[in-house]
Amino acid sequence: MIPSGRLQTLVIYAIAAAVYITIGVFFTDFMLSLFVAMGYLLLAVWLIPEGIRRLFRRIGGA
Amino acid sequence: MSWAAHDLEPYAFQRHLGLKMAFVPVLIGSYAPDLFTKWFVYGISIFGLEIKADDPVQFHRGWPGAGFTHSLLFGVVIGLIIWKVFGSKLWGISFLIGQWAHALTDAGDTVGTMLLFPWTHHFAIGAWAYAGQTGRMTDAAAYFSGLGSMWDLVWILYGLYSWRVLTTQYFNRIIFVADHRFWRFLHRFIGRTGLITLYRAAFFYGCCRWVAWTLWAHVVHDYPYDLSWGGPHWVDAAHP
């Protein structure tokens, strides 16, 4: 069994990868730079999920 | 030339070397030979002006040219400079590991690399076609249709087999500890989750672009696979 925290991380990365690949197939310039990938990954697996988490916390606390 | 292998090899070394290497300089070393040359090989357009090497193969891998960046000596010299200037033997050796991996991997294509520069002999295994001179898109299509693509796949599978090096626990216990000055500095700006994300980025990048270029070449377009030695033979492979 995969621990739930690790599974959640895995799912977030898998979704990020699917979106990255989809964009990359049709706009190949998107895949040319590691720095673009770093920025995208920070956004997709850290900043956006963190923002959503905070939003839900705020709604739950209200 | 190779594509995703340079993104993925550092994680394989990490599995075996643990605290004996710093991850970031290995990654920098792994990209270093192509860092300032690849754009000139493929050519770019600035305000309608096309800038490209007259002889991309000679420029990329030859001498006169920037081919010395793919030699073992280049890794030693830059590694020594890093050691003496920045005072970090670990960074110097780690850079060397990454750069040597790049130089040896690129010896797999039909042009090969001048591994023992200043001796200008090209060591070429010739397993896949070098097609950098045809431009980025044809090069990508050729690479992801031949044995080079399979070589990348080996590193992806080995990386997945070594999945523990990608975990938070491994990062905290090994990666951060081995190079704590660098990671502690970065920690001030992006926190622990940001650090781990950045650490995983090259692996993510390598795997995703392997899948995406493969889909682009064989689903969106119709480039045929040719896994024969030195292939694909539908492209004009360059030789030294």
Image: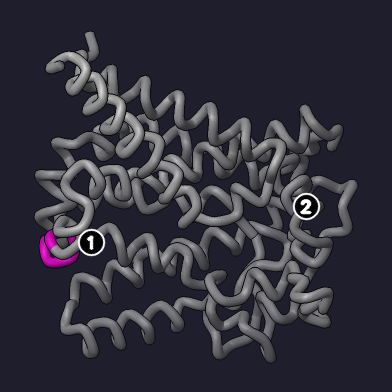
Residue bearing the label numbered 1 = B22
In this view, the residue in front, B221 or B190, is B190
Residue furthest out toward the front: A62
Residue B43, visible in the rendered structure: yes
Residue A56 — which label?
A: none
Horizontal placement of B215 versus B98: left or right? right
Q: Secondary structure at mark 2?
A: helix
User: Residue A60 location, x and y as percent?
Assistant: 17, 14
Where is the C terminus of chain B found, in terms of image quarters? bottom right
Is residue B8 visible to the viewer in this orientation of the structure?
Answer: no
Residue B182 falls within the magenta-colored stretch? yes
> In the picture shown, does residue B22 fall above or below B208?
below
Q: Residue at x 32, y 49 (%)?
A: B198
User: In the image, B237: left or right of B169?
Assistant: right
The mark found on residue B137 in the picture is 2
* Residue B79 coordinates in the image, percent (x, y): 32, 80
Label 2 is placed on what type of residue? Met
| Color scheme of the displayed model | one colour
Q: Chain of mark 1?
A: B
B173 lies above or below A19: below
Left or right position of B105 against B54: left
User: What residue range appears in magenta?
Assistant: B180-184
The residue under label 1 is which amino acid type? Ala
